[in-house]
Amino acid sequence: MNYAIAQTSGKQFLFELGRWYDIDFVKKTNQGDFLTFEKILFIRKRKKLQLGKPFLNVEIPAEVLQATVKGKKITVLKTKPKKKYTRTRGHRVSYTRVKILVPQ
């Protein structure tokens, strides 16, 4: 497999072998666990292409490198003019870091 396009958490990712990706947080996973991506849209193996209509019957295995990774902090500032009112809130999105393995 050179690369594959898979759908997970409502998003599409271009997966390549041996690379790691941050996907949306997956509950009840620990470091070293294995996940499989089942909604595969497209696979390219050398010069052969496979296109799903809408999905292929292939699974891509992945190993959990880190169960929880925090993203960049987003600061939200809310003000009301002429009322001396300001409120600052922060938010960080949690991700799960996975490494793509060789499919069977």
Image (cartoon, rainbow, N blue to C red):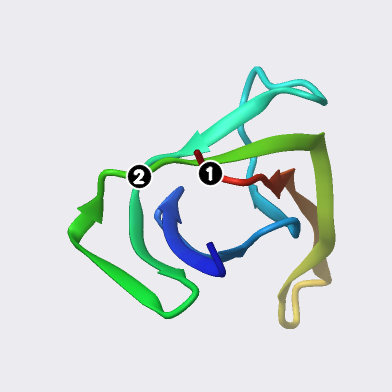
Name the residue located 71 percent from the left edge and 35 percent from the top edge: 63
Quadrant of the image occupied by residue 5:
bottom left
Disc 2 marks a residue whose amino acid type is Val
Read off the residue under disc 1. 103
- Which residue, as the protein is rendered here, is positioned at the far front? 47
Give coordinates of residue 100: x percent, y percent: 66, 49
On residue 58, the disc is: 2
Which element carries disc 1, helix, strand or loop?
loop
- Residue 52 picture quarter: bottom left
Foreground residue, 101 or 99? 101
Query: Where 90 falls versus 44 (above or below)?
Result: above
Q: Nearer the viewer, residue 70 or 88?
A: 70
Please rate how many residues cluster around mark 1, counting C-alpha atoms within 10 Å: few if below 14, some from 14 to 19, many from 20: few
Q: Find residue 72 and report its image quarter.
A: bottom right
Residue 26: x percent and y percent? 61, 32
* x, y percent for residue 79: 74, 73
- Residue 95 falls left or right of residue 32: left
- For label 2, the crowd category at 10 Å Cα-Cα, with few meaning under 14, some 14 to 19 and many 20 or more, is some
* Amino acid type, label 1: Pro
Mark 2: secondary structure: loop
Q: Residue at x 53, y 44 (%)?
A: 103
Q: In the visual, does 22 lie left or right of 75?
A: left
Q: Write the residue at 71% across / 54% down.
A: 22
Q: Residue at x 71, y 22 (%)?
A: 33
Work out whether 22 lies above or below 84. above
Q: CA distance from mark 1 to mark 2?
A: 8 Å
- In the image, 20 versus 30, the foreground residue is 20
Percent x, y of residue 77: 78, 70
Marks 1 and 2: CB-CB under 8 Å?
A: yes
* Residue 63: assigned label: none
